[in-house]
Protein backbone atom coordinates (compact mmCIF):
# COMPACT_ATOMS: atom_id res chain seq x y z
CA UNK A 1 0.00 0.00 0.00
CA UNK A 2 2.80 2.39 0.85
CA UNK A 3 4.55 1.75 -2.44
CA UNK A 4 1.37 2.40 -4.39
CA UNK A 5 0.67 5.68 -2.61
CA UNK A 6 4.16 7.11 -3.02
CA UNK A 7 4.09 7.64 -6.79
CA UNK A 8 0.69 9.34 -6.61
CA UNK A 9 1.89 11.73 -3.93
CA UNK A 10 5.00 12.57 -5.93
CA UNK A 11 2.90 13.23 -9.02
CA UNK A 12 0.63 15.70 -7.26
CA UNK A 13 3.58 17.51 -5.76
CA UNK A 14 5.29 17.79 -9.13
CA UNK A 15 2.20 19.26 -10.79
CA UNK A 16 1.01 21.67 -8.10
CA UNK A 17 4.12 23.76 -7.98
CA UNK A 18 4.40 24.90 -11.59
CA UNK A 19 4.70 28.70 -12.06
CA UNK A 20 1.77 29.53 -9.85
CA UNK A 21 -0.65 27.77 -12.20
CA UNK A 22 -3.45 25.82 -10.54
CA UNK A 23 -2.89 22.12 -9.98
CA UNK A 24 -3.55 19.78 -12.86
CA UNK A 25 -6.04 18.12 -10.66
CA UNK A 26 -8.36 20.89 -11.80
CA UNK A 27 -8.80 18.67 -14.81
CA UNK A 28 -9.48 15.64 -12.75
CA UNK A 29 -9.82 14.49 -9.20
CA UNK A 30 -7.84 17.10 -7.25
CA UNK A 31 -10.04 19.89 -8.54
CA UNK A 32 -8.69 23.42 -8.56
CA UNK A 33 -11.77 24.42 -6.61
CA UNK A 34 -11.04 22.09 -3.74
CA UNK A 35 -7.24 22.01 -3.73
CA UNK A 36 -6.41 25.69 -3.61
CA UNK A 37 -2.76 26.76 -3.64
CA UNK A 38 -1.45 28.04 -0.35
CA UNK A 39 0.76 30.67 -1.93
CA UNK A 40 -0.74 34.11 -2.35
CA UNK A 41 0.79 34.42 -5.82
CA UNK A 42 -0.83 31.24 -7.07
CA UNK A 43 -3.99 31.48 -9.11
CA UNK A 44 -7.10 29.43 -8.59
CA UNK A 45 -10.38 30.37 -10.16
CA UNK A 46 -12.51 27.30 -10.61
CA UNK A 47 -15.88 27.33 -8.89
CA UNK A 48 -16.53 24.66 -6.24
CA UNK A 49 -16.99 21.27 -7.83
CA UNK A 50 -18.28 18.26 -5.96
CA UNK A 51 -15.91 15.39 -6.71
CA UNK A 52 -15.24 12.05 -5.14
CA UNK A 53 -12.93 12.29 -2.13
CA UNK A 54 -11.08 9.19 -3.36
CA UNK A 55 -8.45 10.09 -5.95
CA UNK A 56 -7.31 7.47 -8.43
CA UNK A 57 -3.56 8.01 -8.83
CA UNK A 58 -3.60 6.45 -12.30
CA UNK A 59 -6.38 8.82 -13.39
CA UNK A 60 -4.49 11.81 -12.03
CA UNK A 61 -1.37 10.68 -13.85
CA UNK A 62 -3.23 10.28 -17.13
CA UNK A 63 -4.79 13.72 -16.81
CA UNK A 64 -1.47 15.35 -16.04
CA UNK A 65 0.19 13.66 -18.99
CA UNK A 66 -2.47 14.14 -21.68
CA UNK A 67 -4.24 17.40 -20.80
CA UNK A 68 -3.00 20.93 -20.09
CA UNK A 69 -2.77 21.78 -16.43
CA UNK A 70 -4.48 25.17 -16.62
CA UNK A 71 -7.66 23.79 -18.24
CA UNK A 72 -10.35 22.36 -15.99
CA UNK A 73 -12.04 19.58 -17.95
CA UNK A 74 -13.57 18.07 -14.79
CA UNK A 75 -12.63 14.56 -15.89
CA UNK A 76 -13.20 12.99 -12.49
CA UNK A 77 -16.67 14.53 -12.21
CA UNK A 78 -17.51 13.41 -15.75
CA UNK A 79 -16.56 9.80 -15.04
CA UNK A 80 -18.56 9.85 -11.81
CA UNK A 81 -21.65 11.11 -13.66
CA UNK A 82 -21.24 8.47 -16.36
CA UNK A 83 -21.16 5.72 -13.76
CA UNK A 84 -24.08 7.22 -11.84
CA UNK A 85 -26.25 7.35 -14.96
CA UNK A 86 -25.13 3.89 -16.12
CA UNK A 87 -24.34 5.39 -19.51
CA UNK A 88 -22.98 3.12 -22.21
CA UNK A 89 -22.49 5.57 -25.10
CA UNK A 90 -21.51 9.17 -24.37
CA UNK A 91 -21.43 12.02 -26.89
CA UNK A 92 -18.75 14.68 -26.46
CA UNK A 93 -19.47 18.09 -27.98
CA UNK A 94 -17.04 20.99 -27.82
CA UNK A 95 -16.10 24.12 -29.79
CA UNK A 96 -13.35 23.96 -32.36
CA UNK A 97 -10.82 25.48 -29.99
CA UNK A 98 -11.06 22.42 -27.73
CA UNK A 99 -11.23 19.70 -30.38
CA UNK A 100 -7.47 19.23 -30.10
CA UNK A 101 -8.08 17.66 -26.68
CA UNK A 102 -11.05 15.51 -27.74
CA UNK A 103 -9.10 12.32 -28.48
CA UNK A 104 -7.21 12.55 -25.19
CA UNK A 105 -10.46 13.01 -23.26
CA UNK A 106 -12.00 10.02 -25.04
CA UNK A 107 -8.98 7.89 -24.21
CA UNK A 108 -9.15 8.79 -20.52
CA UNK A 109 -12.92 8.35 -20.18
CA UNK A 110 -13.00 5.00 -21.96
CA UNK A 111 -10.00 3.76 -19.97
CA UNK A 112 -11.47 4.61 -16.57
CA UNK A 113 -15.16 3.95 -17.33
CA UNK A 114 -15.81 0.28 -17.90
CA UNK A 115 -17.72 -0.54 -21.06
CA UNK A 116 -18.33 3.08 -22.13
CA UNK A 117 -18.09 4.16 -25.75
CA UNK A 118 -17.47 7.83 -26.55
CA UNK A 119 -18.61 9.61 -29.69
CA UNK A 120 -16.98 12.88 -30.76
CA UNK A 121 -19.43 15.27 -32.41
CA UNK A 122 -17.39 17.17 -34.97
CA UNK A 123 -20.04 19.60 -36.20
CA UNK A 124 -19.31 23.25 -35.61
CA UNK A 125 -20.34 24.57 -32.19
CA UNK A 126 -20.61 28.34 -31.87
CA UNK A 127 -22.14 28.51 -28.40
CA UNK A 128 -24.39 26.93 -25.83
CA UNK A 129 -27.32 27.39 -28.21
CA UNK A 130 -25.69 24.80 -30.49
CA UNK A 131 -25.97 21.92 -28.03
CA UNK A 132 -27.03 19.02 -30.22
CA UNK A 133 -28.78 16.53 -27.98
CA UNK A 134 -31.14 15.59 -30.81
CA UNK A 135 -28.30 14.25 -32.95
CA UNK A 136 -26.68 12.58 -29.96
CA UNK A 137 -29.90 10.74 -29.22
CA UNK A 138 -30.24 9.72 -32.86
CA UNK A 139 -26.75 8.22 -32.64
CA UNK A 140 -27.87 6.01 -29.77
CA UNK A 141 -26.14 8.00 -27.04
CA UNK A 142 -27.71 7.96 -23.58
CA UNK A 143 -25.58 10.81 -22.19
CA UNK A 144 -23.94 13.94 -23.53
CA UNK A 145 -21.08 16.11 -22.25
CA UNK A 146 -21.02 19.66 -23.62
CA UNK A 147 -17.73 21.54 -23.14
CA UNK A 148 -16.94 25.23 -23.10
CA UNK A 149 -20.35 26.84 -22.56
CA UNK A 150 -22.79 27.52 -19.75
CA UNK A 151 -26.16 25.87 -19.15
CA UNK A 152 -28.15 27.98 -21.57
CA UNK A 153 -30.41 25.05 -22.38
CA UNK A 154 -31.51 23.58 -19.00
CA UNK A 155 -30.61 19.95 -18.40
CA UNK A 156 -34.24 19.14 -17.57
CA UNK A 157 -35.29 20.06 -21.11
CA UNK A 158 -32.72 18.04 -23.07
CA UNK A 159 -33.71 14.70 -24.55
CA UNK A 160 -30.84 12.78 -22.90
CA UNK A 161 -28.77 13.16 -19.75
CA UNK A 162 -26.55 16.20 -20.20
CA UNK A 163 -23.49 17.43 -18.34
CA UNK A 164 -22.08 20.92 -18.91
CA UNK A 165 -18.34 21.40 -18.38
CA UNK A 166 -17.36 25.07 -18.43
CA UNK A 167 -13.64 24.34 -18.94
CA UNK A 168 -12.45 27.07 -16.63
CA UNK A 169 -9.01 28.37 -17.53
CA UNK A 170 -6.61 29.70 -14.93
CA UNK A 171 -5.32 33.25 -15.26
CA UNK A 172 -2.25 34.99 -13.91
CA UNK A 173 -4.18 37.06 -11.40
CA UNK A 174 -1.26 39.12 -10.07
CA UNK A 175 -0.32 40.18 -13.60
CA UNK A 176 -3.94 40.99 -14.46
CA UNK A 177 -4.48 43.12 -11.36
CA UNK A 178 -1.12 44.86 -11.78
CA UNK A 179 -1.89 45.69 -15.40
CA UNK A 180 -5.20 47.30 -14.42
CA UNK A 181 -3.66 49.26 -11.56
CA UNK A 182 -0.86 50.56 -13.73
CA UNK A 183 -3.07 51.76 -16.59
CA UNK A 184 -6.20 53.05 -14.88
CA UNK A 185 -7.70 55.55 -14.61
CA UNK A 186 -5.28 57.46 -16.86
CA UNK A 187 -6.15 55.35 -19.91
CA UNK A 188 -9.83 56.22 -19.69
CA UNK A 189 -10.64 58.81 -22.39
CA UNK A 190 -11.15 62.27 -20.93
CA UNK A 191 -13.68 64.84 -22.21
CA UNK A 192 -10.80 66.79 -23.78
CA UNK A 193 -9.94 63.84 -26.00
CA UNK A 194 -13.49 62.76 -26.81
CA UNK A 195 -13.47 64.47 -30.20
CA UNK A 196 -10.28 62.69 -31.24
CA UNK A 197 -11.67 59.38 -30.05
CA UNK A 198 -14.85 59.92 -32.04
CA UNK A 199 -12.80 60.54 -35.17
CA UNK A 200 -10.89 57.31 -34.64
CA UNK A 201 -14.13 55.42 -34.06
CA UNK A 202 -15.70 56.76 -37.24
CA UNK A 203 -12.66 55.83 -39.31
CA UNK A 204 -12.60 52.32 -37.86
CA UNK A 205 -14.80 49.58 -39.27
CA UNK A 206 -15.32 47.92 -35.92
CA UNK A 207 -13.89 44.61 -37.13
CA UNK A 208 -10.58 44.58 -35.27
CA UNK A 209 -8.91 45.87 -32.12
CA UNK A 210 -7.35 49.27 -31.84
CA UNK A 211 -4.06 48.47 -30.10
CA UNK A 212 -2.70 51.99 -30.07
CA UNK A 213 -3.73 54.24 -27.22
CA UNK A 214 -2.56 57.84 -27.13
CA UNK A 215 -1.55 57.88 -23.49
CA UNK A 216 1.24 60.43 -23.89
CA UNK A 217 -0.16 62.85 -26.42
CA UNK A 218 0.06 66.43 -25.18
CA UNK A 219 1.06 68.32 -22.09
CA UNK A 220 -2.47 69.71 -21.67
CA UNK A 221 -3.97 66.24 -21.50
CA UNK A 222 -1.43 65.16 -18.91
CA UNK A 223 -2.32 68.14 -16.77
CA UNK A 224 -5.97 67.12 -16.82
CA UNK A 225 -5.27 63.54 -15.81
CA UNK A 226 -2.73 63.87 -13.02
CA UNK A 227 -4.91 65.82 -10.54
CA UNK A 228 -7.59 63.14 -10.85
CA UNK A 229 -5.10 60.44 -9.97
CA UNK A 230 -3.82 62.33 -6.96
CA UNK A 231 -7.26 63.01 -5.53
CA UNK A 232 -7.61 61.07 -2.35
CA UNK A 233 -10.81 59.14 -1.94
CA UNK A 234 -11.52 59.16 -5.68
CA UNK A 235 -12.64 55.73 -6.85
CA UNK A 236 -12.66 54.63 -10.46
CA UNK A 237 -15.72 52.53 -11.22
CA UNK A 238 -14.97 49.63 -13.53
CA UNK A 239 -17.23 46.91 -14.90
CA UNK A 240 -15.53 43.54 -15.40
CA UNK A 241 -16.94 40.78 -17.61
CA UNK A 242 -15.71 37.71 -19.47
CA UNK A 243 -16.71 34.43 -21.03
CA UNK A 244 -17.72 31.48 -18.88
CA UNK A 245 -14.13 30.17 -18.89
CA UNK A 246 -12.93 33.30 -17.09
CA UNK A 247 -15.87 34.11 -14.82
CA UNK A 248 -13.91 33.04 -11.76
CA UNK A 249 -11.06 35.31 -12.86
CA UNK A 250 -13.59 38.15 -13.10
CA UNK A 251 -14.57 37.61 -9.47
CA UNK A 252 -10.92 37.35 -8.50
CA UNK A 253 -10.08 40.65 -10.19
CA UNK A 254 -12.86 42.36 -8.26
CA UNK A 255 -11.38 41.12 -4.98
CA UNK A 256 -7.84 42.05 -5.99
CA UNK A 257 -8.63 45.60 -7.09
CA UNK A 258 -10.83 46.50 -4.15
CA UNK A 259 -8.14 45.75 -1.58
CA UNK A 260 -5.20 48.02 -0.81
CA UNK A 261 -1.98 47.08 -2.57
CA UNK A 262 1.17 46.75 -0.43
CA UNK A 263 4.06 49.01 -1.36
CA UNK A 264 6.33 46.09 -2.24
CA UNK A 265 3.86 44.85 -4.88
CA UNK A 266 3.80 47.95 -7.06
CA UNK A 267 3.59 47.19 -10.80
CA UNK A 268 6.45 47.96 -13.15
CA UNK A 269 6.51 50.30 -16.14
CA UNK A 270 6.44 47.49 -18.71
CA UNK A 271 2.78 46.83 -17.86
CA UNK A 272 1.69 50.15 -19.32
CA UNK A 273 -0.31 50.38 -22.51
CA UNK A 274 1.89 52.19 -24.98
CA UNK A 275 1.36 53.99 -28.27
CA UNK A 276 3.64 55.81 -30.69
CA UNK A 277 4.08 59.40 -29.66
CA UNK A 278 3.02 62.28 -31.83
CA UNK A 279 5.65 64.18 -33.77
CA UNK A 280 5.35 67.19 -31.51
CA UNK A 281 5.68 65.31 -28.25
CA UNK A 282 9.31 64.79 -27.25
CA UNK A 283 8.72 64.33 -23.58
CA UNK A 284 9.86 61.06 -22.03
CA UNK A 285 7.92 61.53 -18.80
CA UNK A 286 5.01 59.16 -18.27
CA UNK A 287 1.52 60.55 -17.81
CA UNK A 288 1.65 59.79 -14.12
CA UNK A 289 4.38 58.30 -11.96
CA UNK A 290 3.82 54.86 -10.50
CA UNK A 291 3.57 56.36 -7.03
CA UNK A 292 0.59 58.43 -8.13
CA UNK A 293 -0.97 55.54 -9.96
CA UNK A 294 -0.99 53.45 -6.81
CA UNK A 295 -3.21 56.04 -5.13
CA UNK A 296 -6.03 55.21 -7.53
CA UNK A 297 -8.78 53.23 -5.88
CA UNK A 298 -11.32 51.10 -7.67
CA UNK A 299 -14.96 50.26 -7.30
CA UNK A 300 -15.49 47.11 -9.35
CA UNK A 301 -18.93 45.91 -10.43
CA UNK A 302 -19.64 42.49 -11.92
CA UNK A 303 -22.85 42.97 -13.93
CA UNK A 304 -25.29 40.16 -14.56
CA UNK A 305 -28.09 39.51 -17.01
CA UNK A 306 -30.07 36.47 -15.98
CA UNK A 307 -30.03 33.55 -16.62
CA UNK A 308 -26.28 34.00 -17.15
CA UNK A 309 -23.79 33.90 -14.31
CA UNK A 310 -22.51 37.17 -12.81
CA UNK A 311 -19.91 38.60 -15.15
CA UNK A 312 -20.74 36.23 -18.00
CA UNK A 313 -21.64 37.58 -21.42
CA UNK A 314 -22.61 35.96 -24.70
CA UNK A 315 -22.19 37.16 -28.23
CA UNK A 316 -25.92 37.94 -28.34
CA UNK A 317 -26.62 38.76 -24.67
CA UNK A 318 -24.96 41.39 -22.53
CA UNK A 319 -26.04 43.64 -19.63
CA UNK A 320 -26.62 47.37 -19.79
CA UNK A 321 -24.25 49.21 -17.50
CA UNK A 322 -25.15 52.08 -15.23
CA UNK A 323 -24.17 55.58 -16.26
CA UNK A 324 -21.55 55.93 -13.53
CA UNK A 325 -19.38 53.11 -14.94
CA UNK A 326 -16.22 54.75 -16.27
CA UNK A 327 -14.68 51.83 -18.18
CA UNK A 328 -15.30 48.23 -19.15
CA UNK A 329 -12.74 45.44 -18.71
CA UNK A 330 -13.21 42.25 -20.70
CA UNK A 331 -11.19 39.14 -19.87
CA UNK A 332 -10.87 36.78 -22.81
CA UNK A 333 -9.41 36.30 -26.26
CA UNK A 334 -11.12 37.54 -29.39
CA UNK A 335 -13.75 40.24 -29.81
CA UNK A 336 -16.98 38.38 -30.52
CA UNK A 337 -18.30 38.39 -26.95
CA UNK A 338 -16.77 41.79 -26.20
CA UNK A 339 -18.57 43.41 -29.12
CA UNK A 340 -21.88 42.31 -27.62
CA UNK A 341 -21.48 44.44 -24.50
CA UNK A 342 -19.90 47.23 -26.55
CA UNK A 343 -23.02 47.36 -28.73
CA UNK A 344 -25.24 47.44 -25.66
CA UNK A 345 -23.14 50.21 -24.04
CA UNK A 346 -21.76 52.44 -26.81
CA UNK A 347 -20.69 55.24 -24.46
CA UNK A 348 -18.53 53.13 -22.13
CA UNK A 349 -14.86 52.80 -23.20
CA UNK A 350 -13.89 49.14 -23.49
CA UNK A 351 -10.59 47.39 -22.80
CA UNK A 352 -9.63 43.77 -23.37
CA UNK A 353 -7.15 41.70 -21.37
CA UNK A 354 -5.99 38.63 -23.28
CA UNK A 355 -5.00 35.99 -20.69
CA UNK A 356 -2.95 34.09 -23.27
CA UNK A 357 -0.75 36.93 -24.50
CA UNK A 358 -1.12 38.98 -21.29
CA UNK A 359 -1.80 42.13 -23.28
CA UNK A 360 -4.21 44.89 -22.35
CA UNK A 361 -5.66 46.70 -25.37
CA UNK A 362 -8.17 49.44 -26.03
CA UNK A 363 -11.04 48.26 -28.23
CA UNK A 364 -13.19 50.38 -30.56
CA UNK A 365 -16.39 49.72 -32.45
CA UNK A 366 -18.05 51.71 -35.22
CA UNK A 367 -21.53 52.06 -33.74
CA UNK A 368 -22.68 54.61 -36.31
CA UNK A 369 -21.89 52.36 -39.24
CA UNK A 370 -23.54 49.33 -37.65
CA UNK A 371 -26.73 51.19 -36.84
CA UNK A 372 -26.83 52.76 -40.28
CA UNK A 373 -26.47 49.40 -42.04
CA UNK A 374 -29.15 47.77 -39.90
CA UNK A 375 -31.50 50.73 -40.33
CA UNK A 376 -31.14 50.48 -44.11
CA UNK A 377 -32.06 46.79 -43.98
CA UNK A 378 -35.18 47.56 -41.92
CA UNK A 379 -36.15 50.33 -44.35
CA UNK A 380 -35.87 47.93 -47.28
CA UNK A 381 -38.05 45.42 -45.45
CA UNK A 382 -40.72 48.04 -44.80
CA UNK A 383 -40.65 49.08 -48.44
CA UNK A 384 -41.36 45.48 -49.41
CA UNK A 385 -44.42 45.57 -47.15
CA UNK A 386 -45.79 48.65 -48.90
CA UNK A 387 -45.52 47.12 -52.36
CA UNK A 388 -46.51 43.57 -51.42
CA UNK A 389 -50.23 44.13 -52.03
CA UNK A 390 -49.59 45.44 -55.54
CA UNK A 391 -47.28 42.55 -56.34
CA UNK A 392 -49.70 39.97 -55.01
CA UNK A 393 -52.47 41.31 -57.27
CA UNK A 394 -50.12 40.84 -60.24
CA UNK A 395 -49.18 37.30 -59.10
CA UNK A 396 -45.65 38.47 -58.44
CA UNK A 397 -43.85 36.40 -55.79
CA UNK A 398 -40.95 38.81 -55.33
CA UNK A 399 -42.56 40.24 -52.19
CA UNK A 400 -42.45 36.96 -50.28
CA UNK A 401 -40.55 36.86 -47.00
CA UNK A 402 -38.54 33.83 -45.91
CA UNK A 403 -38.47 32.98 -42.20
CA UNK A 404 -35.45 30.79 -41.51
CA UNK A 405 -35.47 28.40 -38.56
CA UNK A 406 -31.92 27.45 -37.61
CA UNK A 407 -31.33 23.72 -37.23
CA UNK A 408 -27.80 23.90 -35.79
CA UNK A 409 -28.25 22.37 -32.38
CA UNK A 410 -30.87 24.23 -30.35
CA UNK A 411 -30.62 27.50 -32.27
CA UNK A 412 -34.02 26.97 -33.79
CA UNK A 413 -36.74 28.14 -31.42
CA UNK A 414 -40.38 27.73 -32.40
CA UNK A 415 -41.43 30.44 -29.96
CA UNK A 416 -39.26 32.98 -31.78
CA UNK A 417 -40.45 31.67 -35.12
CA UNK A 418 -44.11 32.16 -34.18
CA UNK A 419 -43.41 35.69 -32.93
CA UNK A 420 -42.50 36.60 -36.51
CA UNK A 421 -44.83 34.45 -38.58
CA UNK A 422 -47.99 35.44 -36.71
CA UNK A 423 -47.63 38.91 -38.25
CA UNK A 424 -47.33 37.49 -41.76
CA UNK A 425 -49.65 35.50 -44.00
CA UNK A 426 -48.70 31.93 -45.02
CA UNK A 427 -47.79 31.83 -48.70
CA UNK A 428 -49.98 28.79 -49.29
CA UNK A 429 -53.04 30.61 -47.90
CA UNK A 430 -53.21 34.16 -49.34
CA UNK A 431 -55.29 36.53 -47.24
CA UNK A 432 -56.55 40.01 -47.88
CA UNK A 433 -55.93 42.93 -45.59
CA UNK A 434 -59.53 42.94 -44.35
CA UNK A 435 -59.30 39.29 -43.30
CA UNK A 436 -56.41 39.83 -40.92
CA UNK A 437 -57.81 40.09 -37.39
CA UNK A 438 -55.07 41.93 -35.55
CA UNK A 439 -54.67 45.12 -33.62
CA UNK A 440 -51.48 45.92 -35.50
CA UNK A 441 -51.17 47.20 -39.06
CA UNK A 442 -52.37 44.38 -41.32
CA UNK A 443 -50.21 43.12 -44.12
CA UNK A 444 -50.80 40.66 -46.91
CA UNK A 445 -47.12 39.79 -47.19
CA UNK A 446 -46.73 36.04 -47.42
CA UNK A 447 -43.84 34.03 -46.03
CA UNK A 448 -42.09 30.76 -46.69
CA UNK A 449 -40.61 28.82 -43.75
CA UNK A 450 -37.11 27.45 -44.25
CA UNK A 451 -34.87 25.10 -42.31
CA UNK A 452 -31.18 25.94 -42.60
CA UNK A 453 -28.30 24.83 -40.40
CA UNK A 454 -25.76 27.48 -41.42
CA UNK A 455 -26.49 30.63 -43.37
CA UNK A 456 -24.23 32.04 -46.06
CA UNK A 457 -24.68 34.65 -48.80
CA UNK A 458 -24.00 32.05 -51.48
CA UNK A 459 -26.69 29.73 -50.15
CA UNK A 460 -29.41 32.35 -49.75
CA UNK A 461 -28.67 33.84 -53.17
CA UNK A 462 -29.96 30.59 -54.69
CA UNK A 463 -33.49 31.36 -53.51
CA UNK A 464 -35.15 33.61 -56.07
CA UNK A 465 -38.35 35.51 -55.48
CA UNK A 466 -37.53 36.31 -51.84
CA UNK A 467 -37.50 39.97 -50.86
CA UNK A 468 -36.53 39.66 -47.16
CA UNK A 469 -34.93 36.93 -45.05
CA UNK A 470 -35.65 36.73 -41.32
CA UNK A 471 -33.28 34.40 -39.49
CA UNK A 472 -34.01 33.20 -35.97
CA UNK A 473 -30.64 31.55 -35.32
CA UNK A 474 -28.49 34.36 -33.93
CA UNK A 475 -28.86 38.15 -34.05
CA UNK A 476 -25.13 38.53 -34.64
CA UNK A 477 -25.52 36.93 -38.05
CA UNK A 478 -27.53 39.97 -39.11
CA UNK A 479 -25.39 42.51 -37.27
CA UNK A 480 -21.99 41.21 -38.39
CA UNK A 481 -22.75 39.73 -41.80
CA UNK A 482 -26.04 41.27 -42.93
CA UNK A 483 -24.29 43.64 -45.33
CA UNK A 484 -22.87 40.67 -47.29
CA UNK A 485 -26.27 39.24 -48.24
CA UNK A 486 -27.95 40.33 -51.47
CA UNK A 487 -31.28 40.94 -49.71
CA UNK A 488 -32.05 42.16 -46.18
CA UNK A 489 -31.22 39.59 -43.51
CA UNK A 490 -33.16 40.62 -40.40
CA UNK A 491 -32.98 39.36 -36.86
CA UNK A 492 -36.28 38.72 -35.03
CA UNK A 493 -35.94 42.08 -33.27
CA UNK A 494 -35.37 43.92 -36.54
CA UNK A 495 -38.25 42.07 -38.17
CA UNK A 496 -40.49 43.22 -35.31
CA UNK A 497 -39.48 46.80 -36.05
CA UNK A 498 -40.23 46.38 -39.74
CA UNK A 499 -43.60 44.78 -39.00
CA UNK A 500 -44.49 47.43 -36.41
CA UNK A 501 -45.00 44.95 -33.60
CA UNK A 502 -46.32 46.44 -30.38
CA UNK A 503 -43.47 46.94 -27.93
CA UNK A 504 -40.73 46.90 -30.55
CA UNK A 505 -38.78 50.11 -30.08
CA UNK A 506 -35.87 51.17 -32.21
CA UNK A 507 -32.78 53.18 -31.46
CA UNK A 508 -32.14 56.87 -31.94
CA UNK A 509 -31.62 57.83 -35.57
CA UNK A 510 -33.22 54.74 -37.06
CA UNK A 511 -35.48 57.05 -39.09
CA UNK A 512 -38.64 54.95 -39.16
CA UNK A 513 -41.72 57.10 -39.77
CA UNK A 514 -44.54 57.36 -37.30
CA UNK A 515 -47.43 54.95 -37.69
CA UNK A 516 -51.10 55.09 -36.94
CA UNK A 517 -52.42 56.75 -33.79
CA UNK A 518 -49.35 58.95 -33.69
CA UNK A 519 -47.18 56.20 -32.21
CA UNK A 520 -43.59 56.53 -33.34
CA UNK A 521 -40.97 53.82 -33.22
CA UNK A 522 -38.26 55.07 -30.88
CA UNK A 523 -36.29 53.80 -27.94
CA UNK A 524 -37.00 54.68 -24.38
CA UNK A 525 -35.30 57.85 -23.23
CA UNK A 526 -32.92 56.09 -20.84
CA UNK A 527 -31.62 53.79 -23.59
CA UNK A 528 -32.11 55.97 -26.63
CA UNK A 529 -28.72 55.18 -28.21
CA UNK A 530 -28.50 51.47 -27.43
CA UNK A 531 -29.09 48.60 -29.79
CA UNK A 532 -30.52 45.88 -27.48
CA UNK A 533 -28.40 42.77 -26.88
CA UNK A 534 -30.85 40.73 -24.82
CA UNK A 535 -31.57 37.71 -27.00
CA UNK A 536 -31.29 35.13 -24.19
CA UNK A 537 -32.17 37.44 -21.30
CA UNK A 538 -35.07 36.51 -19.06
CA UNK A 539 -36.30 40.10 -19.02
CA UNK A 540 -35.81 40.94 -22.66
CA UNK A 541 -37.52 43.72 -24.57
CA UNK A 542 -40.15 41.64 -26.35
CA UNK A 543 -41.63 38.38 -27.49
CA UNK A 544 -39.10 37.90 -30.29
CA UNK A 545 -36.54 36.41 -27.87
CA UNK A 546 -36.50 32.77 -26.66
CA UNK A 547 -36.76 33.47 -22.92
CA UNK A 548 -38.95 36.57 -22.80
CA UNK A 549 -40.78 36.74 -19.48
CA UNK A 550 -39.22 33.58 -18.08
CA UNK A 551 -37.43 35.45 -15.30
CA UNK A 552 -40.62 37.09 -14.02
CA UNK A 553 -42.03 35.25 -11.04
CA UNK A 554 -45.69 34.38 -11.07
CA UNK A 555 -48.12 34.67 -8.19
CA UNK A 556 -47.10 31.26 -6.87
CA UNK A 557 -43.43 32.21 -6.80
CA UNK A 558 -42.48 30.06 -9.79
CA UNK A 559 -40.76 31.43 -12.85
CA UNK A 560 -42.25 31.29 -16.31
CA UNK A 561 -40.33 28.26 -17.55
CA UNK A 562 -42.46 25.27 -18.34
CA UNK A 563 -42.35 22.39 -15.88
CA UNK A 564 -41.05 19.15 -17.46
CA UNK A 565 -43.80 16.66 -18.18
CA UNK A 566 -42.24 14.06 -15.87
CA UNK A 567 -42.38 16.49 -12.93
CA UNK A 568 -45.88 17.84 -13.43
CA UNK A 569 -48.28 17.01 -10.60
CA UNK A 570 -51.06 14.56 -11.26
CA UNK A 571 -54.44 16.28 -11.04
CA UNK A 572 -57.20 14.00 -9.78
CA UNK A 573 -60.70 15.30 -10.64
CA UNK A 574 -63.10 15.59 -7.74
CA UNK A 575 -66.35 13.67 -7.85
CA UNK A 576 -69.44 15.78 -8.30
Image (cartoon, rainbow, N blue to C red):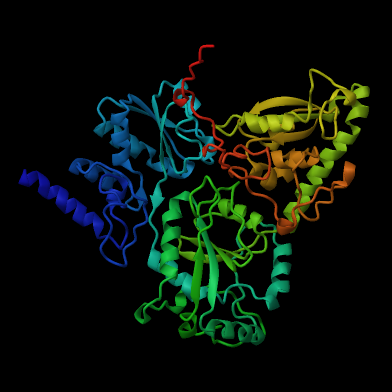
Near-viewer residue (522 or 106):
522
In this image, 270 relative to 203: left or right? left
Residue at x 67%, y 57% (from the top left corner): 206
Q: In the picture shown, does residue 131 fall above or below 289? A: above
Q: As displayed, is residue 336 above or below residue 220?
A: above
In the drawing, does residue 171 fall left or right of residue 361?
A: left
Residue 84's quadrant in the figure?
A: top left
Q: Is residue 537 left or right of residue 68?
A: right
Quadrant in which the C terminus appears: top right
Camera-side residue: 49 or 224?
A: 49
Q: Can residue 386 be spotted in the picture?
A: yes
Q: Residue at x 38, y 42 (%)?
A: 101
The residue positioned farthest toward the front in the image shown: 576
Residue closer to the observer: 42 or 518: 518
Q: With respect to residue 361, does 430 lie above or below?
A: above
Looking at the image, can residue 462 be seen?
no
- Number of labelled discs? 0
Amino acid sequence: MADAAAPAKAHRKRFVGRSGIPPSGANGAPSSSTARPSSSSSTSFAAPISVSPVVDPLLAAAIGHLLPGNYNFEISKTIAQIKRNNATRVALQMPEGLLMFACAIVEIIERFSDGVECVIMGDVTYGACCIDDYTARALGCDMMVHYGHSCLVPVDTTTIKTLYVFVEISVDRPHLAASIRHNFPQCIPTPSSSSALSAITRSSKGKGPELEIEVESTQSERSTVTPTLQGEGKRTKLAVVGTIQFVAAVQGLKADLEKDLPEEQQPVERLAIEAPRTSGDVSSTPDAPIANRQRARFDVVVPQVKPLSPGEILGCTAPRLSKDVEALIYIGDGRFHLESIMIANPLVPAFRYDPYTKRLTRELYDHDEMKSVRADAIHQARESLKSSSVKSSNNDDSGVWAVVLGTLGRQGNLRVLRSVTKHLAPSAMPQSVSDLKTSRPATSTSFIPMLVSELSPAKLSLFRGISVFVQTSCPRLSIDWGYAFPRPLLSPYEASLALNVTGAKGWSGIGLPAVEEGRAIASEAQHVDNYPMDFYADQSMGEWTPRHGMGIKRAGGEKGRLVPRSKRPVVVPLCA
